[in-house]
Amino acid sequence: MSKFTLGWIAAAALLAAPLAQAQSTAKLKVGLMLPYTGTFAALGTAIENGFRLYVTEQGGKLAGREVEFVKVDDESDPAKATDNVNKLIKRDNVDVLVGTVHSGVAMAMAKVAKDSGTPLIVPNAGADAVTGPMCAPNIFRSSFSNWQPGYAMGEVVAKKGHKNVVTITWKYAAGDESVRGFKEAFEKGGGKVVKELSLPFPNVEFQALLTEIAAAKPDAVYTFFAGGGAVKFVKDYAAAGLKKTIPLYGAGFLTDGTLEAQGADADGLLTTLHYADSLGTPRDNAFRLAYAKSFKLQPDVYAVQGYDAAQMLGIGLAATKGDLSKKAEFAAALEKARIDSPRGAFTLSKGHNPVQDIYLRQVSGKENKLIGVASKALADPGRGCRM
Ligand code: BEZ
């Protein structure tokens, strides 16, 4: 190498040094794409609260970078999703995307994230495809796959000796996949799903379907509903007189963040989820106390998932010293991480979905009380994920 070339390299390195420093201490723009209106509005707020709580606990910074938020209300509307996510990336120049609740919206986000390379952390939506066929090195989930709570409940209901089950849900990815997970385990355990009922999202006119359930007289019903729709479904199920005659089981979203509004109609319901209100671990107790102090509200599963999305971002950023262009190092750090969640520590599967305990819970008063672990360290099969 000539003296001239060596001199040029040294000069370039000197110039680059302050630049590299500036890059890793610049403000970190987090694009929060969540529902703030509609049936999932409360879920979006809980996720944002959880995310902010973790950032506040770190002094408002992740890996030395001050965090600033750009927010979009995605309205749980898949038709608006691609435009919304493109605005965050192209107009607002966000460094990282965090969203969302609705599976259909999340799939649109995942497509844009995959094409653009923007890091995406999904803090709720369980669309199996996001960590299945659409999996990518820059896409991570802090929540669950729709398959997971459904599969765990299928095992529980089969073990209870129920033989014929009717399912009822919204007709979209989350409902379909939750039922598919349930059916896979329930039929493996000797049961039969005799009827699959559904209505379009976010419709809550349940009456005709409840009449069909009463006529079919199954041993039990399995359901996926969440947010405002879950409140109405549980109340309508009880009002139709079905709660006394046909046991109702659900993915835990049926009774999470909804108990104030559901009141006694939810009492006794059994659900499966990766969180419960009474885990009683020091980690969860500290989280619940901090959350209640900050927001004057009890946390729910959505708050935990938001909190953990921020933790995951913090882990990736710490490994890259705040430099999100180091994509391979960011991913490697998360792939080997044990995330210290209030739900209990979890790791990520090859498709970047939590490998986690799924709890069996029972509603008692205003709480989803822990009954036991329905499925230990349950990993989504990640069908179709090639990475
Ligand atoms: C979903 O669309 O994936 C979803 C929405 C609310 C709760 C759980 C899952």
Image (tube, rainbow, N blue to C red):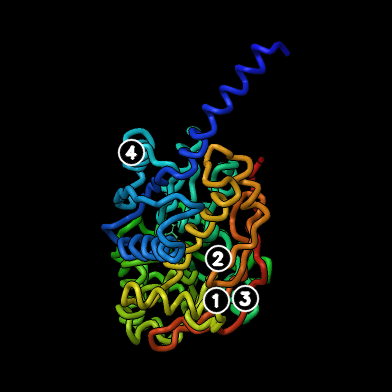
* Mark closer to the observer (1, 3): 1
The percent coordinates of residue 226 (x first, y second) are 39, 66
Q: CA distance from mark 4 to mark 1?
A: 35 Å
Are there few (<14), some (14-19), or many (20+) residues within 10 Å of tag 1? some
Nearer to us: label 3 or label 4? 4
Q: Which residue is mark 2?
A: 150
Q: Which residue is mark 4?
A: 92
Number of numbered discs on residues: 4
Q: Is residue 271 above or below residue 149?
A: below
Which circle's residue, 3 or 2, is located before the other in the chain? Answer: 2
- Name which of mark 4 and mark 2 comes first in the sequence: 4
Q: Position of residue 174 (x, y in %)?
A: 46, 56
Residue 299 visible from this viewpoint: yes
The answer to which image quadrant residue 274 occupies is: bottom right
Looking at the image, is 244 positioned above or below residue 83?
below
Amino acid carrying mark 2 in the image: Gly
Q: Which residue is mark 3?
A: 374
